[in-house]
Amino acid sequence: MNVKRIFGTVLTILGIIGLIYTGYELINKSANYTTLIVVGIIGLIFFFSGIGLVKNTKDAA
């Protein structure tokens, strides 16, 4: 398996975790909205960059 594809998968999983955490804290009405905005934006960046790496990496045997 390609290193870029593994790194893309890890980034995607970290992005999903960040987005789930942000959603969970927003539902619980946490008072730290600044922290949640930062975590949400970083989660989105990780998620989309991970998806892009997995999608654009060619499988060479």
Image: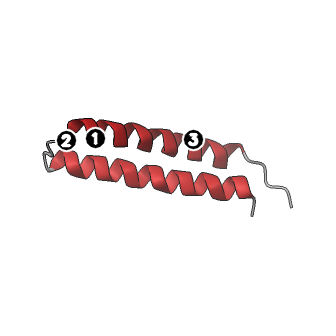
Q: What residue type is labelled 3?
A: Ser
Q: What residue type is labelled 2?
A: Asn
Which element type, helix, strand or loop, lies under badge 2? loop
Residue 55, by quadrant, is: top right
How dense is the environment of label 2, judged by Cα within 10 Å: few (below 14), some, or many (20 and up)? few
Comparing marks 2 and 3, which lies closer to the viewer? 2
How far across and how far down the image is residue 35, in percent? 28, 41
Examine the rendered structure and indicate whether residue 27 appears above or below residue 3. Answer: above
Image quadrant in which the N terminus is located:
bottom right
How dense is the environment of label 1, judged by Cα within 10 Å: few (below 14), some, or many (20 and up)? few
The Cα atoms of the two marked residues, 2 and 3, are separated by: 26 Å
Residue under label 3:
49
The Cα atoms of the two marked residues, 2 and 1, are separated by: 6 Å
How was this image coloured? Answer: secondary structure
The mark that comes first in sequence, 1 or 3, is 1
Comparing marks 1 and 3, which lies closer to the viewer? 1
Discs 2, 1 touching: Cβ within 8 Å: yes
Of residues 38 and 19, the one nearer the viewer is 38
Residue 34, by quadrant, is: top left
Residue under label 2:
32
Residue under label 1:
35
Q: Residue furthest bottom?
A: 1
How far across and how far down the image is residue 33, in percent? 21, 37
Q: Residue at the spot x=40%, y=36% of the render?
A: 41
Examine the rendered structure and indicate whether residue 29 appears above or below residue 61. Answer: above
Residue 43, by quadrant, is: top left
Image quadrant in which the C terminus is located:
bottom right
How dense is the environment of label 3, judged by Cα within 10 Å: few (below 14), some, or many (20 and up)? some
